[in-house]
Amino acid sequence: MKTIIEPFRIKSVEPIRMTTRAEREEKLAAARYNLFALKSRDVLIDLLTDSGTGAMSARQWAAVMNGDESYAGSPSFDRFKTAVQNLMPFDHIIPTHQGRAAEAILMSILGGPGRKIPSNTHFDTTRGNIEASGAEAIDLIIPEGRDSQSLHPFKGNMDLAALESLLTEHGDAVPAVMITITNNAGGGQPVSLENIQAASKLARRHGKLFIVDGCRFAENAWFIKQREPGQFERTITDIVRDCFACADGMTMSAKKDAFGNIGGWLALNDDDLAEQARVKLIQTEGFPTYGGLAGRDLEALAEGLAEIIDESYLRYRIRTNEYIVEQLDAMDIPVVKPAGGHAVFVDAKRWLPGMNPLDYPAHAVACRLYEIAGIRSCEIGSVMFGRQTDGSEKPAAMELVRLAFPRRTYTQSHADYVIEAFAELKDEITSLRGFTITNEPKQMRHFTCAFERQ
Ligand SMILES: *Cc1c(COP(=O)(O)O)cnc(C)c1O
């Protein structure tokens, strides 16, 4: 059969409240054109993020009832730890309430003024935690990763030559090399196993730690299986294990590829580093057998990790994005190709070539998409990355609109509705106006800043 169906049936539903365009225009103006400020009841299809927004399975809900809420020594922690170590063979597994808490703990140990931490592309919270420690976050993506039209199969790869020269010239300043799989900020593009292993080798040759930001490890493994020579016959589990076997640690948001609504972890092999991390964990998150989580969350994550590596799930997951990308591409709407793992990215710089990047073209597209169809997306461009640490503003490398798909939550007809909304938007594209930011916080402004339509 050619039709790839959702590999689940629905046992429990949540209603979507229908709204009119006039109502949505009013709600968005009241939110001062920040999509993060909308109430979720005013959104029809919420593609703001795939983080923590997925549907848990019947088995996960059943596991929740088995949560042991003991302060110390809960068997729920043992089940969680075993499930993590089954895929990621690290010695120390340190649970946190989400990924950024793992990053904050790690950077409190590795970061600091004068230090430099390279990655293929740091996610915004990772960058935020590195910079908050006083260190510099450096993105070393391959050139194809910055070209939305390049069909390179692994556009998330690290630029190994650039990494080598950084390590040669500034090696003393680098405590660790990181790699993000898949590359969220760079379009959900995968990283090849060969590239992960080569980056690890380089880091280790220079005596540096190699840390994987593993948020979408299962989606990345699916791409490796499909696209990397010699990997097709292998199981997702074996590929995942290889991705982490060459690392000294990982940070993880369990709100992504662990089917959790909340959760994360930091994993390390080094005993001394792990001890420092646990001290920080106790100060900021909780006791080492629960971190920032309840026992029931740990149970749900243990089950989620067993489910996420299912190939029929991953096939359906990746196919949804490919399908939307194909349809938008057929309408000549510029999209990042090939489709990424968790999201579809529309290239607003190409779609609105006449608009100044500092009038925020991707934000203009995201706002109009909401007004037309009630779809909430996320700007990944100059609103998110434009403000520099020295206070100046400069355009981001790309102006993208991200449509991130919650896991196991929406169906084919929702995908078709998104495609139809873009057809409508295309008819209105020449009437789009830019935005001005009227009020912004000092850091991570995109979450809370206010806009005015020009
Ligand atoms: C979501 C995400 C994080 C941060 O995780 P949270 O659970 O949201 O704190 C870090 N890195 C990547 C690649 C992510 O996608």
Image: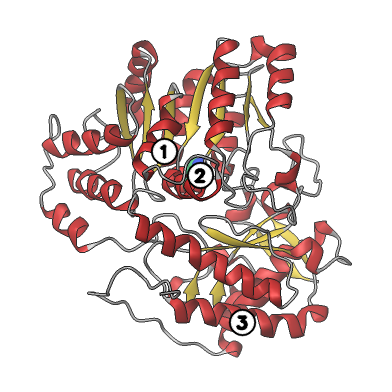
Whether residue 223 is visible, yes or no, is: yes
Q: Nearer the viewer, residue 370 or 60?
A: 60
Sequence-wise first label, 1 or 3? 1
> What amino acid type is highlighted by mark number 2?
Ile
Whether residue 260 is visible, yes or no, is: no
Which quarter of the picture shows residue 287? top left
Disc 1 target residue: 239
Q: Judge from the rendering whether residue 289 lies leftward or rightward of residue 163; answer left or right.
A: left
Disc 3 target residue: 421
> What amino acid type is highlighted by mark number 3?
Ala
Q: Residues within 10 Å of mark 1 (few under 14, many from 20)?
A: many
Q: Residue at x 86, y 65 (%)?
A: 353
Image x and y of residue 415, in percent: 51, 76
* Front disc: 3 or 2: 2
- Quadrant of image for the N terminus: bottom left
* Front disc: 1 or 3: 1
User: Mark 3 and mark 2: span between their CA atoms?
Assistant: 32 Å
Q: Residue at x 64, y 47 (%)?
A: 186
Image x and y of residue 424, in percent: 68, 85
Q: Nearer the viewer, residue 183 or 229?
A: 229
Image x and y of residue 124, in percent: 59, 43
Kind of element beneath mark 1: helix
- The vertical placement of 432 against 110, above or below, is below
Q: Judge from the rendering whether residue 190 lies leftward or rightward of residue 362; answer left or right.
A: left
Disc 2 target residue: 224
Q: Nearer the viewer, residue 42 or 312?
A: 312
Q: Judge from the rendering whether residue 263 lies leftward or rightward of residue 332; answer left or right.
A: left
